Image (cartoon, rainbow, N blue to C red):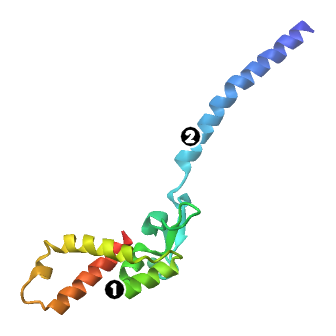
């Protein structure tokens, strides 16, 4: 009887020692084998490309936590050309439009363009300059 119990204890000891080690090794093997295709991916509803989440702007306005916009960054940049298209983009992404978004982006755009030779060129008209500023502001709304 005593020998049987001792044997049982030995087996239990072996299991206890082996299990955590084995599970760690298996976890490490799983992580090593995990292909990049298992990274969280998402399809852009405009270009239909399946892309990693980093290819999308994060939707900070979403109260439920970490979400990204429905269009990839490349599409977003193509779509947002002026104030109206930014408003539509924000609406499409279920975000709240606030005038302050545009105002803050315009400040950033002005700083970005302050050293832009194309923007500062005296040969371009004020209208052209205003269009460049609007386009740059639209892009700054996305960052
Ligand atoms: Zn896209």
Identify the mark nearer the N-term, 1 or 2.
Answer: 2
Choose top left, top right, bottom left or bottom right for residue 86.
Answer: bottom left
Q: Please state which of residues 141 and 33 is positioned toward the viewer in this rendering.
A: 141
Residue most toward the top? 2
Q: Are marks 1 and 2 in contact (CB under 8 Å)?
A: no
What crowding class fits label 2: few (fewer than 14 Cα within 10 Å), some (14-19), or many (20 or more)?
A: few
| Residue 27 image offset from top left, x and y in percent | 60, 41
Which quadrant of the figure contains the C terminus? Answer: bottom left
What crowding class fits label 1: few (fewer than 14 Cα within 10 Å), some (14-19), or many (20 or more)?
A: some
Secondary structure of residue under mark 2: helix
Disc 1 residue lies near ligand 1 with CB under 8 A:
no
| Residue 50 image offset from top left, x and y in percent | 51, 72
Residue most toward the front? 99
Residue placed under numbered mark 1 in the picture: 82
Q: Please state which of residues 89 and 21 is positioned toward the viewer in this rendering.
A: 89
| Residue 14 image offset from top left, x and y in percent | 73, 21
From the viewer's perspective, is 59 left or right of 126? Answer: right
Q: Please state which of residues 30 and 71 is positioned toward the viewer in this rendering.
A: 71
Ligand number 1: quarter of image: bottom left
Q: How many discs appear?
A: 2
Q: Residue at x 11, y 77 (%)?
A: 117
From the viewer's perspective, is 84 left or right of 33? Answer: left
Q: Residue at x 38, y 72 (%)?
A: 142
Which numbered disc covers residue 28? 2
**Residue 73, placed above or below residue 29:** below
For the residues marked 1 and 2, what is the alpha-carbon distance in whole angstroms? 49 Å
Q: Residue at x 37, y 74 (%)?
A: 100
């Amino acid at each position: 009887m005593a020998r049987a119990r001792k044997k049982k204890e030995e087996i239990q000891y072996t299991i206890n020692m082996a299990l955590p080690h084995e599970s760690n090794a298996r976890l490490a093997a799983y992580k090593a084998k995990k292909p990049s295709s298992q990274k969280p991916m998402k399809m852009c509803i405009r270009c239909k490309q399946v892309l990693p989440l980093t290819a999308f702007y994060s939707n900070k306005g979403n109260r439920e936590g970490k979400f990204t916009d429905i269009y990839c960054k490349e599409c977003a940049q193509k779509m947002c050309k002026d104030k109206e298209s930014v408003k539509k983009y924000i609406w499409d992404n279920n975000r709240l439009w606030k005038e302050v978004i545009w105002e803050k982006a315009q400040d950033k755009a002005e700083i970005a363009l302050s050293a832009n030779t194309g923007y500062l060129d005296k040969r371009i008209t004020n209208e052209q300059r205003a269009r460049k500023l609007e386009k740059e502001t639209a892009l700054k709304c996305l960052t």
